Image (cartoon, rainbow, N blue to C red):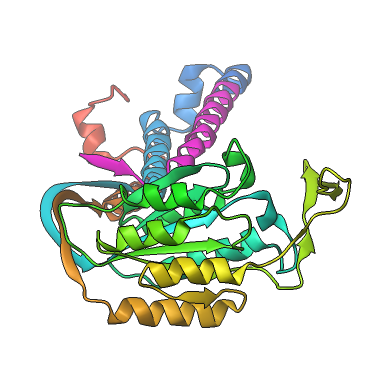
Amino acid sequence: MYQIEEPKYFYLFIAIAILLLFYMLSWLWKVRKQREFASSSLLRRLSPQKSVFKPVLKMVFVLLGLSFLVVAMVNPKMGTQLKTVKRQGVDIVFALDVSKSMLAEDIAPNRLEKSKQIISKIIDKLGSDRVGIIVYAGNAYPLLPITTDHGAAKMFLQNANPEMVSSQGTAINEALQLSKTFFDDDTQTNRFLFIISDGEDHEENSGKIAKEIVDLGIRTYTIGVGSNKGSPIPLKKNGKFQGYKKDKKDEVVITKLNVETLKDIASNGDGKYIYGNKTSKTIEYVEELLLKADKKEFESKQFSDYKDQFQWFVALGLIFLVLDVFLLDKKTKWVQKLNLFNER
């Protein structure tokens, strides 16, 4: 079994192929010029110690040396060593509001980007905890199933935007219901649901559903992003500003942070409301919360432990390049006596 860490460096073999082509053209040019200068027998008498085979061997050493160095840069990882991994932590699901109101710019750069920053920095603070992501607007969708791959979580998070959801609105109830299926029922870990939103246009009975999922061991915390003063919702196409969203009366819509709705959900969900506009304080609160939570063993699986093998290819590459340096174009006396290559 093997893995390739940096396959992009395989393109360097094109440069090696060009070098080989250049050598062959150069060799043909030399042969042609030598024939124009004198006959083969005369050239052998003029340079009796010149080897015909060694220049070719030197070029082979150079090509092999460079090829091994390229493979080292690709860094193949090999091995089939199996390890049993046991992790301890908690399960965390983020429900991110990606409705149009989250594009309001009363919080720089806008509410949605601020929410992404908060989630990303929380993920950076996690240890062996598992994380999952839900996005919702008019509907709720699973963006990333619960996983220990924090790098993948951050990658998927960056792609979250209002265009991912077909209908607009704020389907918080659907997001709460979807969160029930995200947690692994086989392991009874501490479970946290963080809803990041401006709290606007939420449906009724959200608090009731939040109370229901407490029975499943899920504590719901809400993080409010936005300002009480509010802000219009910018409309952009291909990154260019087109104007602000308007209602049926052709008046500009002003979206505001709805704290009461978010507090009601958190209160019923056995959690707390967190004011998210100050990123550092939000991260500190969540970090402290998760540190105090009981960590339980939630995973025991086997995986193949791949080890870096680049050092072997570096060594081989350097050996061939060093051999090229010490290998002279003259005939080797003991090889000449054997006459392996019919050089006399």
> Is 198 placed left or right of 299 in the picture?
right
- Quarter of the image where one finds residue 66: top left
Query: Is 29 covered by the magenta stretch?
Result: yes
- Camera-side residue of 10 and 89: 89
Q: Which residue shows up at 88% across the image and 51% down it?
A: 251
Query: Where 186 sits versus 47, above or below?
Result: below
- Camera-side residue of 51 and 148: 148
Q: Which residues are magenta?
A: 1-30
Residue 322 position, x and y percent, is 36, 52
Q: Which residue shows up at 30% across the image and 54% down it?
A: 315
- Main SS, magenta residues: helix
> Is 257 placed left or right of 320 in the picture?
right
> Is 156 placed left or right of 131 in the picture?
right
Residue 245 position, x and y percent, is 81, 48
Q: Quadrant of the N terminus?
A: top left
Residue 320 position, x and y percent, is 34, 46
- Camera-side residue of 53 and 147: 147
